Image: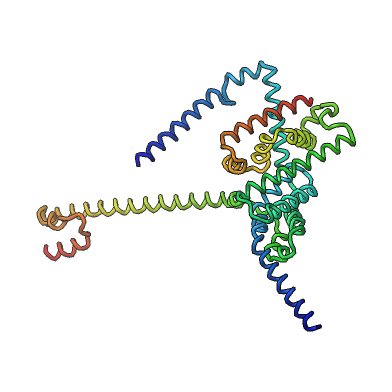
Amino acid sequence: MTLMFGKAISYGSVWDFAADESVVESQRWILSTMQNYGQELVTMLWRILGNEQDVCDAYQDTFLQLAHYEGGRKPKHLKAYVFRTANNIAISMLRRRIAERNKRSRPFTTASVSSPAREIDSKYLQEALRSYIAQLPEHLRNVITLRDLAELSYSQISTILGISAATARVYRCKAIQLLSVWMSKEE
Amino acid sequence: MRVMKLNNQCKRIRTWLYAAISRRFGPEAKWLHNHIMYCPRCQHRLVSYGKVNLALSFMKSQPHGLDLLMRANTQAIAVLKHSLRREPKAQKLERKLPEPKLLERCSHYGHSAVNLAACIVILLLMKIGVFSSMGNLQTQGQKVIKQYYVKQVGEDLADEIFARDTKPPSTANSHGVVNA
């Protein structure tokens, strides 16, 4: 009986080991993705969120979603998937943060007295722009984050978003126009 | 070949058109400057564009902690399957620090590369100069020696000795002198 039990355990562990190996084989690309795009992703997330803990959380969520994509299958356009997922997660986090801040205190946009010192206050400007970027329509927001915050080329953006490079240029122009209108309204 | 030529022509025309249009209608155009100077609405727009650009540059220039990538990788790897976490690649990622891009890395050596290229060019020019001077010296020397032979042994013999320009003077000399 003990012998049989021992054998069952050893077969079990062999089975586990084999399963482990197959998981490693089938999902090793996740680590390669992390290696290839990790740095660019962290930079983009940092610029969108401006908070290191939030960056780590968004990065973690991105790879968690990637690992569970269609039962652990590799997406066809990996870079596009990773960047879009990270972007969406970061924007959701940003919106949540802004909503929480607005609940706690006065909303950021109807803020305070404008003064020349405030105009060039780096943190103030950054936070204002972040909150407006979060309010942009999705197609414009995607272009502005990928072009200006992730510093990708228009051809890369066109591949990621599935639009032409010229359309991406037009979207960026519109996004900047909208942002500048909102930024000037704030005064 | 013809297609390439056409492409080059297209590129030239495109560049020329772009330059012409931006000169006339670009942000550096004089009429635009004059207009903005007296139009409060445009001034306002320009200021707000500047503000957006300034905020974007602030966002880009804000540095993050050096270990942020390492921390993000560690946190992300912690939620992956056990077997993946044990991979040597995963352990490497957990210690990974941000690396500058190839262009940024090369930019440090830019000055040295330019200096090296300048030195090589100078050396090449010197070499070309030295060789051409040597060639001149050789032809001048040949002329002088021929003159000497014309004086000493007569023009016919001198012509015979220096019949071919390619013949080195030493060979001509040894044959010529013996013959003379």
Vertical comparison of A67 with B5: above or below: below
Question: Which residue is at the far top?
Answer: B38
Q: In the rendered view, how is the structure colored?
A: rainbow
Name which quarter of the figure residue B164 lies in.
Answer: bottom left
Q: Quadrant of the N terminus of chain A?
A: bottom right
Vertical comparison of B28 with A37: above or below: above
Name which quarter of the figure residue A113 lies in.
Answer: top right
User: Which is more toward the observer, A159 or B171?
Assistant: A159
Residue drawn where x is 66% and y is 43% of the image = A150
Residue A19, x across and y down, in percent: 69, 67
Residue drawn where x is 67% and y is 46% of the image = A83
User: Which is more toward the observer, B34 or A141?
Assistant: A141
Residue drawn where x is 50% and y is 29% of the image = B19
Residue A75, x across and y down, in percent: 63, 51
Q: Quadrant of the C terminus of chain A?
A: top right
Residue drawn where x is 57% and y is 23% of the image = B29
Residue A5, x across and y down, in percent: 79, 79
Residue B52, x across and y down, in percent: 71, 32
Q: In the displayed structure, does residue A93 sit left or right of residue B170?
A: right
Question: Which residue is at the far front?
Answer: A1
Vertical comparison of B158 with B7: above or below: below
User: Which is more toward the observer, A130 or B152?
Assistant: A130
Q: In the displayed structure, does residue B41 sit left or right of residue B173?
A: right
Vertical comparison of B36 with B12: above or below: above
**How many numbered callouts?**
0
Question: Which residue is at the far right?
Answer: A104
